[in-house]
Image (tube, rainbow, N blue to C red):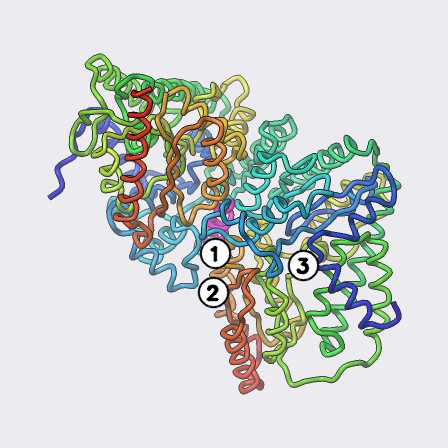
Amino acid sequence: MAQEAQKERSMILQKEMIDGLFNDLANAKELGKKVCYTFIPGNLSELIRTFDMLPVYPEINALQSAMRKKSGAYIKEAEKNAHSEDVCTYVKCDVGMLMKGNVGPTGLKIPEPDILLLSYTGCFTFLKWFETLKREYPNAKVIMVHTPYQENAEMTPHMVEYMVKQLRDEVIPQMEAVTGIKFDEAKLKRHLVLAKEAEDWITKIFDTTKHRPSPIDAYFAGVYYIGPINIGFRGTQEAVDYYKELHAEIMERVRLGLGPITPEGEMKEEKYRLVVEGPPNWTSFREFWKIFYDMGAVIVASSYTKVGGVYDMGWRHDETRPLESLAEYCMNCYTNLNIPQRIALLSKCITDYEADGYITNSIKSCNSFSAGQLAMMREIEDTLEVPVGFIESDLVDPRYFSYSNIKNRLESYFQMLEQRKSMKETV
Amino acid sequence: MNTLKEIIDLCKVQSFDMDFTRAKEWKAEKEGRVLVGYMPIYFPREIIHAAGAMAVGIFGGGDRKQIIKGDAYYQSYICHIPRSIIELALDKHLDHIDGFIFPSICDVIRNLSGIFKQQKIGKFVKYMDFPQNFLPEIGGVFYQQEMEHVLQYIKEINGIEVTKEALNHSIDLYNKNRKMISFIYDIRQDFPWRMSIEEVYYIVRAGTTMPVEEHNALLEKVCEFIKEDIGVPQDKIKVIISGAFCEQPAIGLIKAIEEAGCYVVEDDYMLGSRMILGDIDATTDNPLEAISTSYINQSQYSSSIYDVHNPKEFRLAKMVKERGANGVIFASASFCDPSLLDAPIFQNAFNKLGIRYIAFQYSENINQFKVIKEQVGAFSDSIKLWEDEPVITA
């Protein structure tokens, strides 16, 4: 029988925030709130808050369904309806959930969208996803925000201008029309100030992995830490309070010289420090994590925690340039970075956090991440001479998580790391 | 070139010349000439032409290039075309091409542009972000800036500042090119036996590997030939192929569909060469704006274009009606996100509209089509057996 996970105050705080959001969603009509479906990368939380809307994140519903072992049935339902086996399983899980009555992961019904805010950032599938949802929700207003890709590793003035024009001339007027609320720039600015503060805190939190032992796991626990900032709480006082609390807890662990907390308690010995590229598997999340902590491996940085925004290079929302700032935020999400930028960012993590190794968890149905990962891995191996490892799984399709294959590969990888360590010590 | 067969034979060689010999020769004929490779689906080749350069279509290695190194770059669950393109690059087939353009179509092609950048292949690598906002003053302006970026790259190589006159001239040449290709498809709509879809494919694809002036000269002759009552009609149904717009099916598959009892009267194999419907205004003071406007207002439906305001399923249904097709064959490259994610949209709509269809997947390097041929044959037979029933019921 699995052990009960240890809970800290920040975890309880987060649970309250998320439960509150899902409760509000279940009662959106009674509360007179409009519902806005949108995506994590390029999420315009501050703008959604400015119009008093409630956000729904289909990716979050999908991953939560996977953690509750519901995604397999939803995916099969979608596949019965012409969805291919080979496409994004988040989409299929969402569509399957919709076909089964749209009851969300917490057991409460998810309301229909008033707005489908298609922040087309870093993932082509988003576009197809909302094209599909539009057919299911013909009364919803689809608002497209096209985020230009950082193809040349830069955000040029014309890219910013293109996005600002979309926000000013298309997004905001349409949000006004649907909500009946006039755009209040001062309110948006207040949210941006709070967003910046939360971003400062989360950067400090992920930077604590510089300590030895690392007080946190920046991947398996990191995905919980990014929850509030990614799912609609960025730009609120609640998010700032949550991150302050979390930071305090982590600093206390640093003071005590403690390692990360795992579902089975505190990790006793930090043997390997790793950087991970790619999203985690959600269907067997705890088993996946356990393979790592059982081997004394801690993740000191991961690309996945930057999918909803890259803050560790210094970029912040800026209330003095509200729309420009929203535009830059969208363009600066991890999957909107080009391959050389991703390599540079991950290399910096490996160096700054003194990682012993680099692992790619390649997701079968996520080309936004997966296409190019092998070349990235080779480049990092060549330039940093760091041992690299490669495993494959999927986001929310349980058919593609092979525990023994992954475990075997990781055990071989850790043996290689061990050998390297002893060689270094000998030298 | 005196006969249709001679033209087709030439195009057959040109279309699959992995060394792009004609493009290489064209470049060598005059100093300062530039070759720009572009990937599927669509790129406004007019601007390349106006800049004294030549656009070269790079559509992968098909079943003619063995993949050895490319597989080390891509996992098994990623489509085939990026691995064959990288194989072509690493085997130096693309060495004489100066710059590379990756039009926005999917995450795989997008990330392939990053690998080209990382590997420093070519003098420039540009991921061309086509607008998904279709207001001329927003998306249209952005698109013009993207085109200017490409022109700047070419200017850095050949020093040519593109003029309005040059652009209008190039637009005019490509208008003629598209018009003649449309003519061929229109003739085939009523007389599909005059030229097989395989032959049409060679003719259209060859145009991506030679100067447009030469292609236009060939097309003029082809158009004359197919005005004549040539070929022998056969008892086949008419179908539209949809979904094969990026990774190209092997020629064997293109042939197999017609051999199995279908006339392909419309397809999206070489969609990029036919993306703009009708002419682009070649008389304006702002030709880039004209190109941009045509993309916004005159584009064919495509899986890479956000379509909520102009749903693709109804556009394809309209095409079925206009072409007098008996059904649609959805042919998607394996692991092709844009095509496969569109499948439920099309198929749910066609179930309601009563449009008959089948669907299968292929890979560019697979040349065993027995199963697909049987599937297509059964589709054709089933339609022939119930041919009195109306094709479209709603």
Q: Residue at x 85, y 56 (%)?
A: B214
Per the rendering, the mark at residue B270 is 3
- Residue B274: percent from left, percent from top: 71, 57
- Of residues B128 and B22, which is closer to you in this image? B22
Secondary structure of residue under mark 3: loop
- Answer whether residue A24 is magenta in the image: no
The answer to whether residue B57 is above or below residue B143 is below
Both labels 2 and 3 in a single chain: yes
Q: Earlier in the sequence, mark 2 or mark 3?
A: 3
Chain letter belonging to callout 3: B
Q: Is residue B14 left or right of residue B257?
A: right
List the residue tagged with mark 1: A135
Q: Give the image quarter of residue B102.
A: top right
Q: Residue furthest front?
A: A427
Q: Which residue is mark 2?
A: B348
Disc 1 residue type (three-letter) = Arg
Marks 1/2: CA–CA distance? 10 Å
Query: Quarter-wise, where is residue A292 in the image?
Result: top left
The part of the image, by quadrant, that contains residue A296 is top left
* Classed neighbour count for the residue bearing mark 3: other residues with Cα under 10 Å, few (<14), some (14–19), many (≥20): many
Protein chain holding label 1: A
